[in-house]
Amino acid sequence: MATVLIDEATEIPDGVASLTAFRHWATGGDFPKQGRIDWVGSRIEVDMSPEDLFTHGSVKAEIVRVLGNLCKARSMHLFTGETRVSSVEGDVSAEPDVVVVSDAALNDGRVRLVPSAGGRPDRYVELEGGVDLIVEIVSDSSVTKDTQRLLAAYRAAGVREYWIIDARGEDVQFAIHCWTDREHGAEVSPDQGLSAVFNTQFALTRHRNPAGRFVYDLVVTEATA
């Protein structure tokens, strides 16, 4: 592969032609500091689009607010922003909008913490394996990627649960894909709002504040036994 220049600040160097090479580049010092660059199904996908404030940024903030508190009570860790999740089985290395991984997944080896290059204690740059939960919020440039390519890649990677949120239209679309019982082929209907990871049912609602701007609420509608 020849060097690919996306813009003045984003250059894909020669030789990044495998998942291993991509991960090495992505966790190194030469990786671009802006934009989202993922490896999905043997293809590098670059998205330099700005994040929409009220159909993406506000949604993510609400998800982090609610799930962050739930994670603290359940020995789980929530990450957002530039948190890289990689999987050989899924042929994927991506930076999702929100990631949740449990101590149980780390302790039993289902997910591995990849240390930083310096090898300093408690310093990690990547999660490898089937994390507990990934959330992707659809943007104009990521519709097919989020709803098809990443859906397939995350499932193959062993991710337990995948939330897809699309707030661009008149109504908010919120789907939870649960893959917690792969051995028996069980999958919870994505439109039920039922999270097996949190053993809870969720609803995502939106209204306008007095100034007319969107406000989101991730509501716990039912805690199952």
Image (spheres, grey):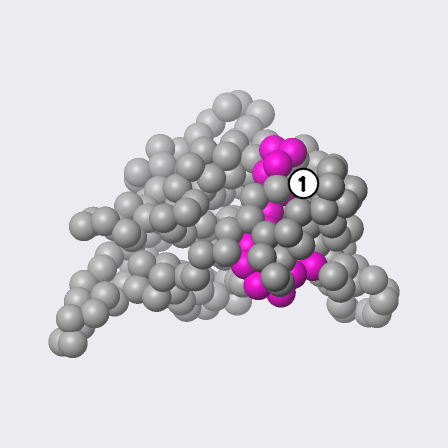
The location of residue 202, given as percent across then percent down, is: 33, 52
Query: Residue, x 36% and y 48% (percent of image)?
Result: 140
10 Å neighbourhood of mark 1: few (<14), some, or many (≥20)? many
Q: In percent of the image, x 78 and y 42: which residue is there? A: 15
Q: Is residue 100 visible?
A: no
Q: Main structural element of the magenta stretch: helix, strand or loop?
A: loop
Q: Which of 46 and 7 is in front in this view?
A: 7
Q: In which quarter of the image is residue 118?
A: bottom right
Q: In this view, does 25 lie to the left or right of 214?
A: right
Q: 89 above or below 68? A: above
Residue 166, given in percent of the width and then of the height, sits at 32, 48
Asked if residue 89 is positioned above or below residue 93 in the image, the reply reads above
Instruction: Tell me the element at label 1.
Output: strand
Q: Which residue is painted at 67% across and 54% down in the image?
A: 11
List the residue tagged with mark 1. Answer: 87
- Residue 120 lies left or right of residue 158; in this view the side is right
Is 151 situated left or right of 201 in this image?
Answer: right
Q: Quadrant of residue 42?
A: top right
Q: Give the range drawn in magenta.
A: 31-43
Q: Which residue is drawn at 53% across and 23% down?
A: 184
Residue type indicated by callout 1: Ser
Number of marks present in the image shown:
1
Relative to 62, does residue 17 appear above or below in the rendering? Answer: above
Image quarter of residue 177: top left
**Residue 2: where, in percent of width, then height?**
73, 41
Residue nearest the viewer, comparing 25 with 146:
25
Pick the front one: 86 or 67: 86
- Magenta-colored stretch includes residue 57: no
**Outermost residue, right direction?**
119
Q: Can residue 68 be seen in this view?
A: yes
Seen from this angle, which residue lies furthest bottom?
Answer: 211
